[in-house]
């Protein structure tokens, strides 16, 4: 491996620890001499130690040992620490750490570092911020595993969505455009019928994997609850569910959280939340989700992803949540936080373009695809406004299509004002999409002005849809009352019992966040309801004399 100079810290991703911080870490770790070529941890394997370079240099390498595909991502020198977010979340490493210059390192067990991060705010913020930034850089570079498949494949779209929503570094290779991908499949003797294919660590090949198989392969933690009854089951890991997990676990409740796709919910796809209390410069939805996940796990909450709830049954004093894989999770109390799913445009052939020009989130993955290209955003709410500001960084132009005649009727004024001030963003009022144009890959949209009656064709390869969402409550049909739009009804007095706020007609079953009928569709209110629900769980335990039991 050719020596490479130490990577400059242009983004705050590679800070140096102070002498005081090194002194704090030293009693918890072991000093080790390292030699040229030593591998400290490998791509695809769990990282169990927090490693600080005391002297010498360590290179972070993608595809180590793979010859021409080997790529050095960064080189760390004295005072810098290795790894990225996977160390805190329990995922597998996405790079290999190879000693480039002999020296000495300090190795601290990951559990010790998690405890230190929780109790030392300055050190914790330094490490967490660096790890979050490194994860974003890896995503932007397209490191990690490769998904090879056709843009027309529903299975391929499912895997890509799972990887993107879980903020996992990966690269998608489209068989329709990349001839080298077809050559690679021929070399591996993989027929087209076996796609999509996931290639991980250069030699691990998954043929037509399910989402659960992919999650297991890349080390996403998926703890399986025991046969006993836990105190609290939370279905949904958006802001409301994560808040409930943090408060429930921190209060000593045995807490299990299930989510079908990813932690963070729809909020995790928001490029920047600027009106969330305590973050005057804003915070991305992904960062908010990652911080909440680490916090919940610190207190002992068990987060299981993917795990899709398919039904709910009362069962002799507790509740059973049926899961798609056949498992049943039992709890004395249940908090429903499944939120809502993206509403789709009513235009012909929409599904044909989903993932190939039509998107429902604006994250670093989508930002990368919009470089110097025109973008269309459909919707007039805050999500549409945030996406427009975010995508304007890379896009050549951004058009926001709004059905109404005043964007401020549905969007926060600070966002609308920011759109007006940002060059390259045009708001088109009274406008709706009537047709998608392309041959499987989007090339344009035909829009109609409802006021003038005129139609216009707009060239674009990326249309983002933010027109609201429908509640994710199909799994609850017949189990709890739903309103005429499918949202969960809570807090109504029955003839036999005075229900608590946020409680359904089943004692001990609560609904919080966007899934609840009458809720305020804001991140802050969802977090507040999640925290409040845990307090109400305790009240219900008291009235029913249903005490906590350990699994």
Image (cartoon, rainbow, N blue to C red):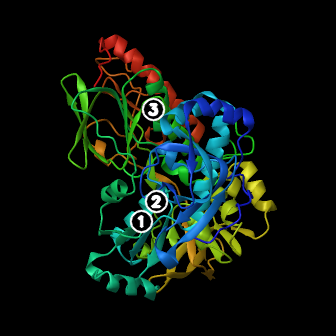
Most distant residue in the left direction: 316
Along the line of sight, the residue nearer the viewer: 104 or 423: 104
Q: From this view, report whether residue 2 is shown above or below residue 236.
A: below
Which quarter of the image is occupied by the N terminus? bottom right
Question: Which residue lies under the disc numbered 3?
Answer: 245
- Alpha carbon of mark 3 to alpha carbon of mark 2: how far? 30 Å
Please rate how many residues cluster around mark 3, counting C-alpha atoms within 10 Å: few if below 14, some from 14 to 19, many from 20: many
The earlier-in-sequence mark between 2 and 1 is 2
- The residue sitting at 72% across, 56% down in the picture is 11
Under circle 1, the secondary element is loop
Image marks 2 and 1: residues in contact by CB distance under 8 Å:
yes
The earlier-in-sequence mark between 3 and 1 is 1
Q: Residue 318: x, y in percent?
A: 24, 25
- Alpha carbon of mark 2 to alpha carbon of mark 1: how far? 6 Å
Which quarter of the image is occupied by the C terminus? top left
Looking at the rendered image, the disc whose residue lies closer to the viewer, 3 or 2, is 2
Q: Residue 344: x, y in percent?
A: 45, 63
Q: Residue 499: x, y in percent?
A: 38, 21
Q: From this view, report whether residue 449 is shown above or below residue 297.
A: below
Q: Residue 124: x, y in percent?
A: 63, 36
Mark identifier at residue 43? 2
Question: Which residue lies under the disc numbered 1?
Answer: 201
Looking at the rendered image, the disc whose residue lies closer to the viewer, 3 or 1, is 1
- The residue sitting at 41% across, 54% down in the picture is 45
- The residue sitting at 70% across, 53% down in the picture is 408
Along the line of sight, the residue nearer the viewer: 199 or 112: 112
């Amino acid at each position: 491996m050719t020596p490479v100079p130490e990577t400059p810290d242009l983004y705050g991703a590679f800070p140096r620890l102070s002498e005081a911080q090194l002194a704090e870490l030293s009693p918890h770790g072991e000093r080790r001499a390292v030699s040229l070529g030593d591998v400290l941890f490998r791509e695809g394997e769990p990282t169990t130690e927090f490693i600080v370079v005391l002297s010498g240099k360590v290179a972070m390498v993608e595809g180590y040992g793979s010859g021409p595909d080997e790529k050095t991502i960064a080189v760390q020198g004295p005072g810098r620490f290795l790894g990225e977010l996977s160390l805190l979340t329990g995922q597998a490493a996405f790079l290999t750490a190879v000693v480039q210059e002999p020296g000495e390192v300090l190795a601290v067990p990951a559990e010790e570092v998690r405890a230190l991060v929780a109790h030392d705010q300055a050190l914790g913020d330094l490490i967490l911020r660096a790890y979050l930034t490194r994860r974003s850089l890896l995503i932007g570079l397209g490191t990690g595993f490769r998904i090879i498949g056709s843009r027309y494949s529903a299975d391929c779209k499912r895997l890509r969505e799972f990887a993107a929503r879980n903020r996992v570094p990966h690269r998608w290779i489209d068989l329709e455009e990349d001839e080298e991908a077809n050559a690679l499949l021929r070399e591996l003797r993989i027929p087209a019928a076996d796609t999509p294919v996931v290639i991980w660590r250069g030699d691990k090949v998954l043929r037509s994997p399910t989402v659960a198989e992919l999650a297991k392969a890349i080390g996403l933690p998926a703890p399986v609850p025991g046969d006993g009854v836990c105190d609290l089951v939370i279905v949904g890991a958006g802001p409301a569910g994560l808040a409930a997990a943090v408060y429930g676990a921190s209060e000593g409740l045995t807490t299990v959280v299930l989510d079908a796709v990813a932690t963070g919910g729809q909020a995790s796809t928001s490029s920047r939340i600027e009106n969330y209390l305590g973050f005057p410069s804003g915070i991305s939805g992904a960062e908010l989700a990652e911080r909440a996940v680490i916090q919940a796990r610190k207190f002992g909450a068990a987060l299981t992803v993917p795990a899709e709830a398919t039904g709910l049954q009362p069962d002799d004093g507790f509740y059973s949540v049926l899961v798609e894989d056949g498992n049943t999770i039992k709890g004395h109390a249940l908090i429903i936080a499944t939120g809502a799913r993206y509403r789709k445009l009513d235009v012909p052939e929409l599904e044909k373009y989903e993932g190939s020009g039509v998107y429902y989130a604006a994250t670093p993955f989508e930002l990368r695809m919009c470089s110097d290209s025109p973008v269309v955003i459909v919707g007039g709410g805050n999500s549409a406004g945030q996406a427009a500001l975010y995508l304007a960084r890379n896009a050549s132009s951004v058009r926001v299509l709004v059905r109404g005649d005043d964007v401020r009727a549905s969007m926060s004024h600070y966002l609308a004002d920011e759109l007006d001030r940002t060059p390259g963003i045009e708001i088109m009022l009274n406008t709706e999409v009537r047709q998608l144009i392309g041959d499987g890959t989007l090339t344009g949209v035909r829009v109609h002005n409802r006021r003038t009656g005129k139609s216009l064709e707009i060239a674009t390869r990326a249309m983002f849809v933010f027109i609201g969402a429908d509640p994710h409550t199909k799994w609850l049909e017949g189990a709890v009352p739903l309103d005429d739009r499918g949202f969960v009804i809570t807090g109504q007095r029955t003839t036999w019992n005075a229900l608590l706020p946020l409680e359904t007609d089943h004692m001990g079953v609560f609904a919080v966040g966007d899934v609840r009928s009458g809720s305020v569709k804001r991140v802050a209110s969802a977090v507040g309801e999640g925290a409040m629900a845990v307090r109400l769980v305790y009240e219900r335990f008291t009235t029913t004399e249903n005490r906590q039991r350990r699994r």
